[in-house]
Image (cartoon, coloured by chain):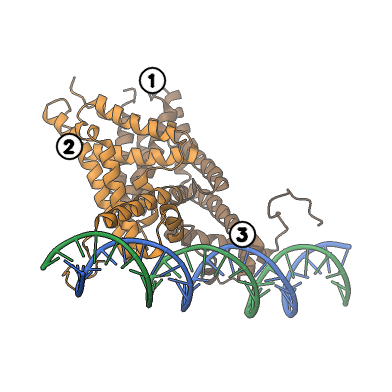
Chain colours: A brown, B orange, C blue, D green
Amino acid sequence: MSTPVKAGEPAERRLTKGGRKTRERIIETAAELMFHRGAGGTSIPDIQAAAGVSASQIYHYFGDKQGLVLAVIDHQTDSRLAEQRPLLDSLDSIEALREWCDRAGGQQDARGCEGGCEIGSLASELADSDQSARASLVSAFDRWEGPIRSGLARMQARGELSERADTAALATALLAAIQGGMLLSQVRRSSTAYRQAVSVVIDHIESHLVR
Amino acid sequence: MSTPVKAGEPAERRLTKGGRKTRERIIETAAELMFHRGAGGTSIPDIQAAAGVSASQIYHYFGDKQGLVLAVIDHQTDSRLAEQRPLLDSLDSIEALREWCDRAGGQQDARGCEGGCEIGSLASELADSDQSARASLVSAFDRWEGPIRSGLARMQARGELSERADTAALATALLAAIQGGMLLSQVRRSSTAYRQAVSVVIDHIESHLVR
DNA sequence: ATATTGTTGGAATGTCAATTCCAACTTGGG
DNA sequence: CCCAAGTTGGAATTGACATTCCAACAATAT
């Protein structure tokens, strides 16, 4: 026991170069599988086969399946947010909002509307059954909503958006429209619902523009 | 084989009085469990214990687990829609829309924001993995969205809503706001996100009122 | 009442998942 | 080069789950 780490957690050991790579591969493979089949629907043997690792490697790096799920949530959060930058940090015009949302719609179409939102799907599955997962998901949505709110706040600070606009509520509403729209699109296999949902919310934001 | 039923389906036999009751009890119990733990997270033994039935009864009435899941989806759809009537059929004023949405917010609070939407949660879990479930869910959302659209259309026909308003898109957007708002509320354990999301969409509808 | 069909209990089966173990191998620092 | 720690493979364990079977029991129509 030479590493005095936090008690309770699997311990954050020192990883060798290859170790880090293996760990990453496991997370990415698990994320991909869990996106399509859900966390509960993805077994450790599934991940073993897809990532080309043995069971002991998974348990070595993540302790248990719940640990892996948490790592996947964090990975998806970082990954999805990174993918949306730098757009995500410049959501301070109606055009930027539309373009940003439209991009997600295009991706949804590209995959034939299979799968919803990487984070939203995990959220729906885990929010009630895994409290630590829920905590991570709260943080994930906050990190997502924050930049939206910031963009709107900048518009308001510049005097482009009415003082009466509640930027926090508008940001939440837009995120909700994205989530709900993605779900409807996933079920209907058409991105129309997503596009309509976000469009309505952005239209509403637009109506607060100071002309 | 005296009952010439559709091939492929478990056959719609004649049910005795007690049989119908058992069948209903299984569905309701399964619906309750699946609402909290998901369809995949609810095992047949779980349902057996909670409903006080034996395995053979479940397989007798539903063929297999997938059959039960489909029955649960239909039951939740009927049940949820019935619960919302008659409000659901009178969504032809801003006040009615607000009251209807507010009611769901109150229910969400009442259960401590645990669990999201009975239909939405199943949708998220099953849309990609079970095609017949997806078909039922498409129908469920259509049956839900229809009355919203009808209400808006009536407002428009009466000249209360601008001709420029796209009632179909607005109805979809409201349903998406409900779903996304419920998800965020479930994760955050606060109905605020739901209330903000639906409020923004209804505000937008309101902005189309012909004054 | 009686045969047919619906209903129920409970045990048995086969599969598969999560997790543990241990032994062998590699790597990096001193 | 050598040790401690990190890494890996593969087998073994344990438990749960979906599903099947069969035998007993009840209801219903003729």
Residue B1 higher or lower than A86, as above or below: below
Q: Write down the residue under mark 2.
A: B150
Q: Dot 1: within a 10 Å radius of its alpha carbon, few (fewer than 14), some, or many (20 or more) residues? A: few
Residue B63 place in picture, x, y as percent: 32, 66
Asked whether residue B43 is in view, the answer is yes
Residue B112 is left or right of residue B150, and the answer is: right
Determine if marks 2 and 1 fall on one subunit: no
Determine if marks 3 and 2 fall on one subunit: no
Q: Dot 3: within a 10 Å radius of its alpha carbon, few (fewer than 14), some, or many (20 or more) residues? A: few
Residue B145 higher or lower than A29, as above or below: above
Q: Amino acid at mark 1?
A: Arg
Q: Write down the residue under mark 3.
A: A64
Viewer-nearest residue: B16 or A6:
B16
C-alpha separation, residue under disc 3 versus residue under disc 1 = 49 Å
Residue at 46 percent of width and 51 percent of height: B37
Q: Amino acid at mark 3?
A: Asp
